[in-house]
Amino acid sequence: MADCEQQKQQIDLGGWLDGRSFDEWRTQFDRDGYIILRDILHQEELIKIRETLAPYLEADVTGRNDFEGLKSNRVYAMLAKSPVFADLVSHPLALAFVEADLGPGCLLSACLAINLHPGETAQPWHFDDSHFQWPRPRPSLGISTFWAIDDMTENNGATEILPGSHLWPDDMIDGAVGEASFNDRSVRDVSSDPGARSDALKVTMPAGSLMLAKGTMWHRGGANKSDKPRLIITPQYCPGWTRQLENMALAVPPAIARNLPRRAQELIGYSIHPPFMGYVDGVHPRKLLDQ
């Protein structure tokens, strides 16, 4: 933990904060449930990410239900596919906010790419830490980050949010995800939107930008009414004492994890949450990688 804190102190976030202090951004984050930081990734980084993802997107494996998106590609187990994504999940700007909320012992809960094709319909409303099933209102048990690899526009399926909803007591709202959403393979017209709301905000931002959202904030993927796909990558984080959504020990086996940057290793679970959660055979899991 001390190493993590020391690393954070050595990183200057100023160039990414648009002239505001980190504390000012955190205050806004706590108030609204989300923040948007624009133009964080350079074009060279975006090109590398697109090139790395290309073979998986070209396979054109689409979602299995209305929630995943019948006209969307989802790429999972991303840290096993390329160290490019390890750099993204351990980006110092994102981690500064994640660690401030969840602690330096936080874990990567999931990381996936979502590619919305033209004609994809709006997703059901949901909040990303709902699987904990703790009554609301409550503190968030997760932080979701949304990296725009393509421009997110009014028409191409930009993520939609309900600002301030991270503080709502509601466990269910109209148009929210339910058990039926995971069994629904019915094809809807792109203009059909049973969850439309007047208080929804479309998160438009240029490629390379970053949105962070509290795990309790209601949001959804929008409908893609354009003629081009829309690609994002969304690493999601949880406290170190909770279970990750994706089984990272299997998604990123030791032979691959051994070659990842140290912080990425810690995030997928080669770390200890005080006093000793996460040990292997009585010792720190990092020793498994050092063998």
Image: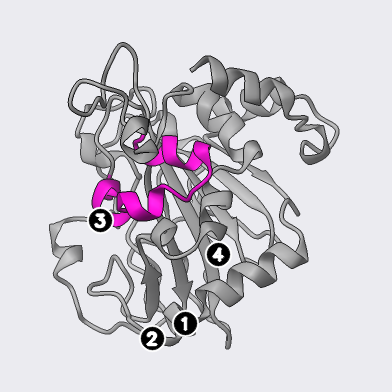
How crowded is the residue under tag 1: few (<14 C-alpha within 10 Å), some, or many (20+)? few
In magenta, the rendered stretch is 245-270
Looking at the image, residue 30 lies above or below residue 124:
above
Residue situated in front as seen by the camera: 170 or 290: 290
How many other residues sit within 10 Å of disc 3, few (<14), some (14-19) or many (≥20)? some
Q: Who comes first in sequence, dot 2 or dot 4?
A: 2
- Which numbered circle lies on residue 59? 2
Q: CA distance from mark 3 to mark 1?
A: 30 Å
Q: Horizontal placement of 118 versus 10: left or right?
A: left
Give the label, 2 or 4, closer to the camera. 2
**Tag on residue 177?**
3
Residue 139 shows up from this direction: yes
Q: Secondary structure at mark 1?
A: helix
Q: Position of residue 194 (x, y in %)?
A: 32, 67
Measure the alpha-carbon separation of dots 2 and 3.
27 Å
Residue that appears at 39% across and 37% down: 290
Report crowding for label 2: few under 14, some 14 to 19, many 20 or more residues within 10 A (C-alpha). Answer: few
The kind of residue on which mark 3 rests is: Val
* Residue 30, x across and y down, in percent: 55, 26
